[in-house]
Amino acid sequence: MTTVQLTSKDFKSNLKPIWCPGCGDFGVVQGIYRALASIGRPPHEIAFVSGIGCSSRIPGYTTAYGFNTVHGRALPIAQGIKLANPELLVLVAGGDGDGFSIGGGHVPHAIRRNPDLTYLVMDNQIYGLTKGQLSPTSACGLKTVTSPHGAIEHPVNPLLYVLSYGAGFVAQATPADMAGMTAIIEEAIRYPGFSFVNVQSPCVTYGEDHQQVKAHRTAMKTLASMGHDPSDRMRAFELASHYGEQLYTGVFYRNPNPPPTYGALVKERQAALAGGLPRERILESFIQR
Amino acid sequence: MTTKVSGLDFSKLTLLDALDLAVLIEEEAMDRYRELAEQLEVHNTHAAAKFFRFMERNEAKHREALLTQRTARFADAPRHVRREMIFDIEAPEYDEARTFMSLRAALEVSMRSETKAREFFESALAQISDSEVRTLFAELRDEEIEHQGLVQKELDKVGSGAPGDPEDYADEPVSH
Ligand SMILES: Cc1ncc(C[n+]2csc(CCOP(=O)(O)OP(=O)(O)O)c2C)c(N)n1
Ligand code: SF4
């Protein structure tokens, strides 16, 4: 593992983003460049995995190794990458549709394994890439192309979802506060285990006015300014339950005693097995039982 | 202002750091105008893109002038201020751009950026005690005021009812 003095520009690829001008993802990717520059791991030691969607294009705009995978499947692939090459810094990006609709079933399993990776969800409460359909985080009553008379379901609360399954680091950010968002992303990357950041990244083309960056600037309230103690998990649940009504930003929960990561447990098990058996006979130990 | 710059104590700002900060502010604005122009070119929003290209060149000139001043005074003395320490001081925010935005809307973006830059230098001045740094920041603030005047002239030329309001073209959900 190398740590060197890097700048944001070291992480910016030559590919020009094709997002709609004004899209929240432009700010998010800048925050990611800066957070990575602070972390100091060179791009070739980073794997950036995504699903499908506008926000899933993020890895392509960085100089890290990128894998724009299949809709909803970024997390399983990222876990595989991390297991195969534990030295890599693994980041995962995707939309609310990618993560909580088609990919929703993968989230609890990633969390309970606790791999050391960071999952950034660009939550714009809409399907952007496919032109404005209802998403799992869309508000009840929202009129879209797939809900012309207004949505009748209630939205998934991504913060409660990940907290309930035991994620050790849960935060929310918005590109309306670039410095705050960058600091949160950096902190998430530094957390040793599964970390989750719900980034309220507005869709200017299909989103509502109150979901835009300008509205966030006045609506947001930092958890730090409220004196929230991120080690208080129960209070984190309470604050997270206001998702959709109140835009809280900052760290809801950070486990003060992070449990061992999946990678560490696997390594331990491999060492225990290899300790008693020659490497080529480890497989036999599984067959015999 | 505190959210726009991290890791710098303005009450102790040296002239070297102040010049480096000023160069970076112009560089950030130059890069941002280029990015916004590129975005709009991809989306065939040519008049606004052309104006952002013009602004990119302007910011490049300002950056160059400040860099010359810095080199004349401090040669290649090590830089303590890094680009990662500043956020959108004179650079327009990303959410300012829109597909099919009019030239007028682009000029308004620029006006807001010049205004926030002026406000930044004004609030920084309130904390600075070094007389040379004060002179530099006062000059920079006055330049922003001058730029505001220039943008206002362009806005007056364009008039109010300029065609190409993005709302005329925006994709709307079918039900709206
Ligand atoms: C298996 C599969 N089903 C559906 C799609 C179509 N599809 C592509 S992106 C997307 C949803 C995009 O929304 P989101 O994940 O929230 O990302 P955003 O574009 O808003 O960033 C859908 C349904 C697909 N590509 N693959
Ligand atoms: S459709 Fe929405 S999410 Fe997709 S690029 Fe455009 S603004 Fe961004």
Image (cartoon, rainbow, N blue to C red):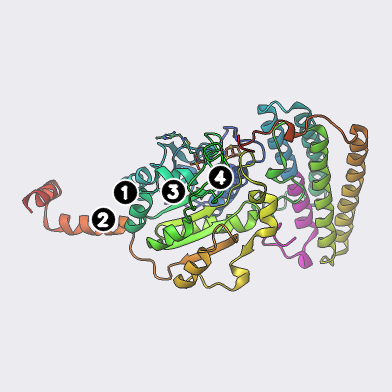
Camera-nearest residue between A152 and A92: A152
Sequence order check: which comes first, mark 1 or mark 4?
A: 1
Q: Quadrant for ligand 2?
A: top right
**Can you give x and y, in whole percent of width and height, for residue B165 in the image?**
77, 33
Amino acid of disc 1: Leu
**Can you give x and y, in whole percent of width and height, for residue B121 in the image?**
83, 56
As measured in the structure, the alpha-carbon distance from the residue carrying label 1 to the one carrying label 4 is 43 Å
Asked if badge 4 and badge 3 are on a common chain, one would say yes
Sequence order check: which comes first, mark 3 or mark 1?
A: 1
Which residue is at 60% across, 42% downward?
A: A203
**Is residue B87 shown to the viewer in this render?**
no
As measured in the structure, the alpha-carbon distance from the residue carrying label 2 to the one carrying label 1 is 8 Å
As measured in the structure, the alpha-carbon distance from the residue carrying label 3 to the one carrying label 1 is 23 Å
Q: Secondary structure at mark 3?
A: helix
Residue A66 is drawn in which quadrant?
top left
Which label sits on residue A266? 2
Instruction: Name the residue tied to disc 1.
Output: A83
Camera-nearest residue between A89 and A108: A108
Residue B7 is drawn in which quadrant?
bottom right
| Label 3 Cα neighbours within 10 Å, binned few <14 / some 14-19 / many ≥20 | many
Instruction: Name the residue tied to disc 4.
Output: A150
Asked if badge 2 and badge 3 are on a common chain, one would say yes
Residue B6 falls inside the magenta stretch: yes
Quadrant in the picture for the C terminus of chain A: bottom left
Is residue A48 left or right of A245 when viewed as pictured? left
Which residues fall within the magenta stretch? B1-26
Instruction: Name the residue tied to disc 3.
Output: A100
**Camera-side mark, 3 or 1:** 3
Which residue is at 71% across, 30% downward?
A: B169
| Label 4 Cα neighbours within 10 Å, binned few <14 / some 14-19 / many ≥20 | some
